[in-house]
Each structure stands twice: as C-alpha cells, then as structure tokens.
Image (cartoon, rainbow, N blue to C red):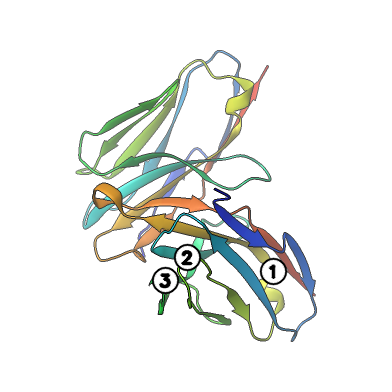
Amino acid sequence: NAGVTQTPKFQVLKTGQSMTLQCAQDMNHEYMSWYRQDPGMGLRLIHYSVGAGITDQGEVPNGYNVSRSTTEDFPLRLLSAAPSQTSVYFCASSYFPRGTYEQYFGPGTRLTVT
Amino acid sequence: ILNVEQSPQSLHVQEGDSTNFTCSFPSSNFYALHWYRWETAKSPEALFVMTLNGDEKKKGRISATLNTKEGYSYLYIKGSQPEDSATYLCAAWASGGYQKVTFGTGTKLQVIP
C-alpha cells in the first residue's frame, strides 16, 4: 500500500493564481481531511469528508474548495491564492475502528504564495 | 474549538535520560486523545489512541497515560535515544464528530548523544 500520497511536494504561486493540491489514499478509508500547518500553531482543519460525495468545512475553510467524487481522492482547490495561504498542507485519511478515529497523514505540500 | 496545550515547547535531554511531557485539554465533552511522533521533513505518525480515563499505552520505551477527569495526558520516554528526536503532537477529539479535533503545537525533543 502506498498509504496517503500528496502532490506536488512544493509549489510557488503568485497572488491570484489558482491550483489544486492532490491527495489520494489506497486504504479504502471513509474519512479524509485537509490540514494546514503554520509556525507556532497546531495543525488546523480546513475541510473534511466522511465519504464519497460528502464534504464539510473545518476550522479554517475560507479560500479553499474540496470535492470527493471517489473514496480514494480528495483534492483541495485554491481559487485565488493569497499570501496568507502560504503554509504546509497535510492530507489525512482515517477509519473508525473500535469507536475512535485512526489517522494517517500524507507527506505534505509546502506552498508559497508571493 | 478545544484549547489544547502542550508543555514544554521544547527540551533537550542527554542520551539515556528519561523524560516526559504533557498535553492538556478541556475535560468536558472529551472523546479521544491521540499522540503522534513527527520527524522533521516527514508526516505525523500515530503513536497512541486513548479514550478511557486511566488508559495506559506502551510501545517499546514510550508510554502514555490519560486522565480525562482533569484533562491531561502524559507521554513518557524511558532511556532516550538520538532517534527519539522529533516533535511529539497531541490531538484531542471532542464529542460531536470527526471535525471536533484540535491539535496542540507539539513538544520538540532533541536527544543529545
């Protein structure tokens, strides 16, 4: 199993550009989520999905869109990048054995918006 | 959003020393606590999932305890080794669904050979 994969690893965007961060998992997990990591802060939830076709907002959703057309893929779209979106982005997939979540993280995408 | 705090922010220990750090979280509506190990340039890797008051988990030289009534968890490392150098994250889940998670900012451990 590849686990959770993310592409690209690094990206530089200009303000106003759009792009999609890709995330895929091959563990057949129901739950998938996107987090951002900023200096001095804990990982913050951007959007999450509890199954194909179902998405919802997390703590910091503004400026980001997601969709979940398949169990495997959960792309994160930045419609008009802003410098405040400079961050490291982690995708995670989870399942729910024994009454609690088990999360697996991807390797991260480091995004710089100039 | 829960207020999850970890202390200390960072610490340096000598190889062979034992150490511990703390994760504090609100005790009301508690659902689960996760500990992760996060090496530089890698992704967080799950260490423990804890749900019950009094839970104790162990993996090799690393162990964790949970007190849900007072809202804290301790992570212990016995006989620290240089390969234990990493940031240790905790994440607390409140009741109410997958989105009710808050991560702490982590404790960065450096083990000096």
Residue A109: percent from left, percent from top: 67, 61
Q: Which amino acid type is shown beneath numbered disc 1?
A: Thr
Mark 2 vs 1, N-terminal side: 2
**Which residue is at the front of the view, A69 or B55?**
A69
Residue B47: percent from left, percent from top: 44, 37
Mark 3 vs 2, N-terminal side: 2
For the residues beneath circles 2 and 1, the answer to whether they share a chain is yes
Residue labelled with disc 2 = A33
Residue B31: percent from left, percent from top: 25, 53
**Which residue is at the front of the view, A74 or A58?**
A74
Q: Which mark is residue A55?
A: none
Q: Which amino acid type is shown beneath numbered disc 3?
A: Ser
- The chain identifier of the residue carrying mark 2 reads A
Determine contact: label 3, label 1, CB under 8 Å.
no
Query: Separation of disc 3 and disc 2 at Cα?
Result: 6 Å
**Which residue is at the front of the view, A90 or A30?**
A30
Residue labelled with disc 1 = A86
Q: Residue furthest top?
A: B16
Mark whose residue sits in front, 2 or 1: 2
Mark 3 vs 1, N-terminal side: 3
Residue at 27% across / 45% down in the picture? B71
* Category of crowding for the residue at label 3, using alpha-carbon neighbours closer than 10 angstroms: few (below 14), some (14–19), many (at least 20): many
Residue at 64% across / 85% down in the picture? A79
Q: Secondary structure at mark 2?
A: strand
The quadrant the N terminus of chain B occupies is: bottom left
Along the horizontal axis of the image, is A12 left or right of A57?
right
Residue B3: percent from left, percent from top: 38, 57
Picture quarter containing residue B75?
A: top left
